[in-house]
Image (tube, grey):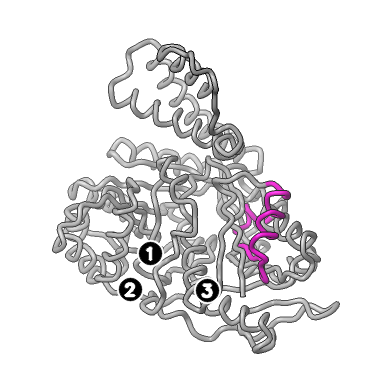
């Protein structure tokens, strides 16, 4: 059994990192003796002829992809191309988007055979067994599949994966050197699950309300692996690393016990941090804790079921400052109940936190499939303008409330984007006129270097222009260097 896994394209502006979900799924396939290859389109140019070459060489039985709403079109395009190249392959799509729009997605894309819903590690192995003829698709829980002209759903999965029995992600199948060249962090998790019920998020539905904790020793084993791979930072992608202090402290203590020097960041809710646990995290290498703050208006926080108070936001930032950990907070514009006044309150809180030393960012509401804001849009008086999933990138207004129309929100989004661009161009100007600090020059050079590397990758320049040969033996050393510089340029 051969499985070709596609990681669909998304832009550099979305801060790509080696795909963690793909790593877990491919590791589970490998453990089941399935031969796997990964075609990673985040850092590799997509070309149908390239896909055809890969498929001719690898001869996959299944071509699969995982996608969020923003990457859905990219994933489906590649799966449709795979089906045209070899109609016998089974095409499968997983991920958050299709988990809540499976039947609609199959109906709209005839080239898609199967959708895998929710956690996929067990489902994908059983799917391979079905494709191999060892069982039926209907017997595999957690699938939506094509049956002739009909679209059918199997029974849902009734248990969650035991995170302590999963193999470590098969990161060796992805082009890690390309991500490392871009200077991106690498992600891992120490738990799965989220007890909160935020109406704009599908985390609880996708991975369960009860948090499943990994053993601290296994967590730090994986951290050690990632340090050895040479990535500058590890992102702990748990929904809530600090939800249980004993777990967070156990991980930190294990890092300290081993003397592991590692830089990492984590996510937290403002209700789940205090100075002692943040201090231990700092000692163990944590540099930043990111909070979803969402709004500067208390009523909106209540409506969204965030479960926090404005006062707790300030306390959490103060605790980070006292512990020596940087606080980072993100806000969402366009939540139910939004008005120009509530937007002003959110911006004011963001400025206040910035003055306290926190990093803050703003995003526009994206009503993803499966979220309460989408499924109960009428209840929340939310108007959704488009199902063009490529626009679900949280950078532009695609919803409006009775108090804040789309144009009002778009002005805010434009201001955010303009402010970020101005900061960069101001930095560029200081670099050009020689007034930039050493740190600023290094930061600017890093941005430019990563842009060059990205262009090299996404235009196949190394593959097509990455070497040259000359028979001109009479070249002097200086002439040879000049020729080399011209070629590199």
Foreground residue among 263 and 156: 263
Nearer to us: label 1 or label 3 = 3
Marks 1/3: CA–CA distance: 19 Å
Which residue corresponds to mark 1? 189
Q: Mark 2, residues whose alpha carbon is within 10 Å: few (<14), some, or many (≥20)?
A: some
Q: Residue at the location (49% across, 85% down)?
A: 159
For residue 223, what is the image quadrant? bottom left
From the viewer's perspective, is 310 left or right of 347?
A: left
Mark 2 or mark 3: name the one nearer the start of the chain. 3
- The one nearer the camera, 15 or 208, is 15
The residue beneath circle 2 is: 214
Q: Secondary structure at mark 2?
A: loop
What residue would you read off at disc 3? 29
Q: Position of residue 229 (x, y in %)?
A: 34, 52
Compare residues 207 and 444 and report the one nearer the observer. Answer: 444
Examine the image and state in which quarter residue 367 appears.
Answer: bottom right
Foreground disc of the pair 2, 3: 3
Q: Is residue 302 above or below residue 150?
A: above
**202 within the magenta span:** no
């Amino acid at each position: 059994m051969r499985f070709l896994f596609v990681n669909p394209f998304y832009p550099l502006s979305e801060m790509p990192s080696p795909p963690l979900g793909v790593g877990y799924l491919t590791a589970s396939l490998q453990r089941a003796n399935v031969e796997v290859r990964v075609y990673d389109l985040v850092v590799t140019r997509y070309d149908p002829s390239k896909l055809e070459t890969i498929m001719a060489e690898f001869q996959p039985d299944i071509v699969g992809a995982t996608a969020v709403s923003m990457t859905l079109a990219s994933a489906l395009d590649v799966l449709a191309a795979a089906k045209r190249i070899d109609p016998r392959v089974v095409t499968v799509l997983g991920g958050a988007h299709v988990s809540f729009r499976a039947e609609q997605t199959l109906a709209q894309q005839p080239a898609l055979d199967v959708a895998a819903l929710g956690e996929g590690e067990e489902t994908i192995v059983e799917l391979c067994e079905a494709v191999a003829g060892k069982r039926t698709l209907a017997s595999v829980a957690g699938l939506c599949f094509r049956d002739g002209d009909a679209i059918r759903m199997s029974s849902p999965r009734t248990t969650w994966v035991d995170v302590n029995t999963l193999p470590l992600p098969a990161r060796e199948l992805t082009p890690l050197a390309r991500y490392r060249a871009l200077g991106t962090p690498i992600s891992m998790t120490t738990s799965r699950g989220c007890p909160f019920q935020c109406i704009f998020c599908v985390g609880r539905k996708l991975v369960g309300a009860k948090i499943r904790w990994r053993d601290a020793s296994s967590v730090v084993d994986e951290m050690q692996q990632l340090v050895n791979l040479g990535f500058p930072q590890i992102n702990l992608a748990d929904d809530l690393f600090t939800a249980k202090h004993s777990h967070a402290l156990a991980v930190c203590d294990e890092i300290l016990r081993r003397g592991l020097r590692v830089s990492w960041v984590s996510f937290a809710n403002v209700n789940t941090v205090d100075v002692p646990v943040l201090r231990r995290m700092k000692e163990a290498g944590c540099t930043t804790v990111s909070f979803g703050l969402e709004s500067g208006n208390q009523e909106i926080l209540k409506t969204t079921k965030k479960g926090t108070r404005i006062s707790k936001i300030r306390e959490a930032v103060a605790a980070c400052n006292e512990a020596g950990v940087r606080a980072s907070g993100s806000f969402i514009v366009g939540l139910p109940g939004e008005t120009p006044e509530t937007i002003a309150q959110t911006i004011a809180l963001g400025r206040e936190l910035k003055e306290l030393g926190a990093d803050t960012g703003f995003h526009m509401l994206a009503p993803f499939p499966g979220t309460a804001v989408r499924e109960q849009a009428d209840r929340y008086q939310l108007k959704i303008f488009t199902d063009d999933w490529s626009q679900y990138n949280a950078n532009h207004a695609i919803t409006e409330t009775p108090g804040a129309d789309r144009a009002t929100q778009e002005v805010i989004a434009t201001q955010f984007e303009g402010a970020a661009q101005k900061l960069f161009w101001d930095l560029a100007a200081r670099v050009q006129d020689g007034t930039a600090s050493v740190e600023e020059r290094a930061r600017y050079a890093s941005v430019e270097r990563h842009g060059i590397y990205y262009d090299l990758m996404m235009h196949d320049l190394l593959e097509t222009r990455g070497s040259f040969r000359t028979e001109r033996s009479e070249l002097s050393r200086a002439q040879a260097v000049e020729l080399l510089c011209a070629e590199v340029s």
